[in-house]
Image: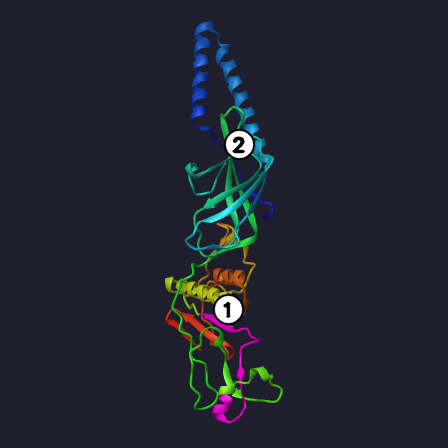
Amino acid sequence: MGAKPGVVEQSRIARSGRYSAFLFAALLFLVATFWFTTRSRLAPTVVGTTLAALLVADWRGARKNLDRLEVGMAGPVRAQVGAPIDFRLHIDNVGRPVRLVQPGSTTAHSYVIDRSGWTELHLPPAPRGIQRFLYIDLISRGSFGLIEQRRRYRCWLDPHVAVAPAPLGQPVSWPPRHAAVTGQANATIRGEDLFRSIREYQRGDPKRSVHWPSSARHGALMVQERDGQGTFHIRLVVHTPVAGPAAEACLGRALWLGLDVLRRGWTVELVTIEPAWGAAPPQRLVRATGVLPRSVSGAGPMRVVTGNVDELALRERTARAAFGPIPPPPGGPLTRVISPLGDLWL
């Protein structure tokens, strides 16, 4: 369950709908009947005092019902652009039923919570970014149904929810492996025959790395040079110089290819550009909606972030990625550059 929420808006008092209007009409009818029956000048005073007492009692009851609530929120492990997001809300000390409404939506799309425990919230899709908290409105009525109070809560999500881009599938043509000796034929990389190059044997090389067909062809011991100890390593460089649909599509292709490489049992190194504040953005950027928005070029200092990723880190990095130029990557493992102009192997 997430961190304890804070109340970010004072309670708002409102009439409680049709039931309230019916009760007011009934009271007016009683006032008129009492006055015509007794012709007493005290009739309006008595009824008015009674009505005021009912309103105060109703207001206190609605407020007390909200004051004792304890609210927590938990988000999903995975979320992506264009898909609804399922959150889990936990409310303790529920007395009378309360109605939950997300700010900006209508009461027609609300949840009625009548007991303590967990509640599933199915919310509309969110933009790409890091969801750090969620606003909810809780509405409570008094005992007599005359008054309702609405209170807004900011529910922090711990851990935060990374809204990743939608993976965009693509046909990938693996590059030919590089020949270290003149005259060696190239072969297409696929599956388990991916390796960096073939070179001459050096003292200390393990015997199992000897490539006998090449050794026979060249008249000298040749060894296979692989990326890692039996695990292939792929570097993905996501070049998104400016914001726009093309840059978002690049992130979607990078996510799809990264997931495909991880499914093969290989390791993935991801290179992206992010805001300089990293995982701790200024509060002014997330105070309004709870979602860290996509940063645009020129909006602040940027930095190039690189490192090996698993599935969850891959989704979070593509969700947090910003826009800006990335310098050419240094030499190293097999590298795929993904940019709005096209994808290529280095």
Q: Residue 213 colored magenta?
A: no
The residue stretch that appears in magenta = 214-238
User: Which residue position is annotated with label 2?
Assistant: 97
The residue closer to the viewer here, 180 or 150, is: 180
In this view, 91 is above or below 181: above
In this view, 284 is above or below 145: below
The residue closer to the viewer here, 50 or 21, is: 21
Q: Residue 221 colored magenta?
A: yes
Residue visible at 51% across and 10% down in the picture: 42
Q: Element at badge 2? A: loop
Residue 269 location in percent, x, y?
52, 70
User: Which residue position is annotated with label 1?
Assistant: 270
Residue 144 location in percent, x, y?
52, 23
The residue closer to the viewer here, 162 or 234, is: 234
The residue closer to the viewer here, 212 or 10, is: 212
Q: Element at badge 1? A: strand
Q: What amino acid does circle 1 point to?
A: Leu
Of the image marks 2 and 1, the number of the one nearer the N terminus: 2
In this view, 65 is above or below 153: above
Residue 191 location in percent, x, y?
47, 73
Asked whether, in this view, residue 282 is left or right of residue 20, the answer is right
- Is residue 160 among the parts visible in the rendering? yes
Q: CA distance from mark 2 to mark 1?
A: 48 Å
Q: Contact, CB < 8 Å: mark 2 with mark 1?
A: no
Residue 79 location in percent, x, y?
48, 54
- Is residue 297 among the parts visible in the rendering? no
Res. 67 image quadrant: top right
Residue visible at 39% across and 66% down in the picture: 170
Q: What amino acid does circle 2 point to?
A: Pro
The tag on residue 139 is none
